[in-house]
Amino acid sequence: RGNDGVAELPHVTLNQPDGLSCEIYLPPKLDRSQKHPLIFGSSPAGNAHDILRVWRGTADQFGWIVVGSGNYRNGPNDAHQNQLQLETIAIVMRDYPVDPARVYAVGLSGGGMNSYILIDAHPEMFRGIVVNTGMMPQHMAGNPPFDAAHFPHDKVAVLLASPTDFRFGEMHEDRKLLESFGWQIDWIEFDGGHKYAPSSRYVEAAAWLRDH
């Protein structure tokens, strides 16, 4: 079940006529007089609630805002889908006390790949990423090759990797590539294969991001 979340948790649901869909989780003790990091998450099947469930305990502990997007699904890169995600972030930053220097794209598997796509296309928007058993887009057949000339430098990434995951080898390759571009990396391993890491690993990831 990932981050030991419960089936139901308080959140704000946002749906718009243009197709935008997301769920927003605000920690109960959120200090609205201060700016807070934003976790923007996507899942392979567009399950926004999964993101909230996985990150809830960590958000409560650190006072971070969490958004689960309903506009990403595994498949060919979709320009409208990407635009809806950017629109979601803009709305959340307008309506909630978000620190614009601390926005992170996160996700499991294909959602992790989406995190790479977002930070590559919009490095000015994201400080870093958290990828849970996911790989960079160029590993997938049919995707464009890696574009070194335009890839961002000096970002941060937490890579949550499992030795029994079928993407473990690609994640090792990605770590070396990111480091060659000046990225700071926190490599965290867990048992279980291609699944969400346990709650303690997400707490560890957030603590590292807080200090970097």
Image (cartoon, rainbow, N blue to C red):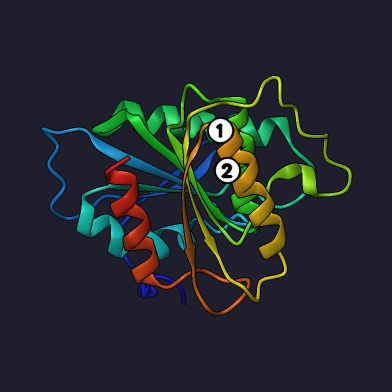
Q: Nearer the viewer, residue 48 or 156?
A: 156
Q: Is residue 10 visible?
A: no
Residue at numbered disc 2:
115
Residue 72 tag number: none
Element carrying mark 1: helix
Local SS, label 2:
helix
Q: Are marks 1 and 2 in contact (CB under 8 Å)?
A: yes
Locate residue 1, reporting x and y percent.
Answer: 47, 77
Of all residues shown, which one is farthest toward the right?
142
The answer to which image quadrant residue 108 occupies is bottom right
Whether residue 30 sits left or right of residue 113 in the image: it is left
Up the image or down, 177 lies above or below 149; here it is below
Q: Residue at x 59, y 39 (%)?
A: 178
- In the image, is 162 to the left or to the right of 60? right
Q: Position of residue 71 (x, y in %)?
A: 60, 44
The amino acid marked with disc number 2 is: Ser
| Place of residue 122 in the rendered image (x, y in percent of width and height, measured from the top left) | 56, 25
Q: CA distance from mark 1 to mark 2?
A: 6 Å
Q: In which quadrant will I find the C terminus?
A: top left
Horizontal and vertical percent for residue 190?
49, 73
Label 2 environment density (alpha carbons within 10 Å; few <14, some 14–19, many ≥20): many
Tell how many labels. 2
Three-letter code, disc 1: Ile
Q: Is residue 13 left or right of residue 45?
A: left
Residue at image location 65% in from the left, 47% down from the top: 174
Residue positioned 72% across, 69% down in the render: 166
Residue nearest the viewer, comparing 36 with 189:
189
- Label of residue 119 in the image: 1
Q: Is residue 125 visible?
A: yes
Are there few (<14), some (14-19), or many (20+) residues within 10 Å of tag 1?
Answer: many
Q: Residue at x 40, y 59 (%)?
A: 52
